[in-house]
Image (spheres, grey):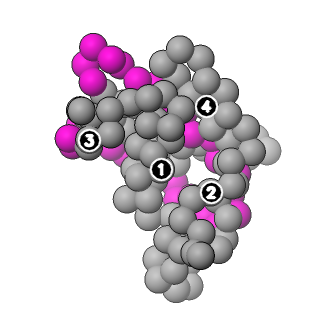
Amino acid sequence: MEQRKPTITEVHVEDKSATIIMKVDANILDFRGHFTHFPLLPGVSQIDWALFYAIEYLGTPPLFKGMEVIKFQEPILPDSVVTLELTWDDDKQKLAFKYSSQTSDRLVIHSSGKMKLGG
């Protein structure tokens, strides 16, 4: 079977927030053809993973109702180790997410956004 999700190495859940450390394995199917000479993780995969792990770890509603804010700042490359931070606002039915990684000298924000979810 083809690999579609990253390798999760750590998960920390507290109330309505989760921090997930993952290795974005080079053999993930989503890298194929995106792009041949410079593979990077598609934005749609990042959104899919944020929703998937929010449902799994925070029990958020499963229905995607749209994006409100999204920024793709730095590509996520094969075999990167990234941190996904998720925060659920139950009153507003909004999920905030941020993918980041640490280089030797700085914190890199790969992408962030907010999505509206429902039942």
Q: Which mark is residue 6?
A: 2
Q: Position of residue 11 (x, y in %)?
A: 67, 34
Characterize the local packing of mark 1: few (<14), some (14-19) or many (20 or more) Cα atoms within 10 angstroms: some
Report the quarter where the N terminus lies. Answer: bottom right
Q: Is residue 112 visible?
A: no
> Residue tagged by mark 1?
49
Q: Amino acid at mark 2?
A: Pro
Q: Start and end of the magenta stretch? A: 65-93
Asked if marks 2 and 1 touch (Cβ < 8 Å), the reply is: yes
Picture residue at 41% right of the left edge, 43% below the top:
51
Q: Position of residue 54 (x, y in %)?
A: 46, 36
- Picture residue at 57% right of the left edge, 75% below the top: 2
| Residue that numbered label 4 is attached to | 19
Q: CA distance from mark 2 to mark 1?
A: 9 Å
Packing grade of label 4 (10 A; few <14, some 14-19, many >=20) is many
Secondary structure type for disc 1: helix
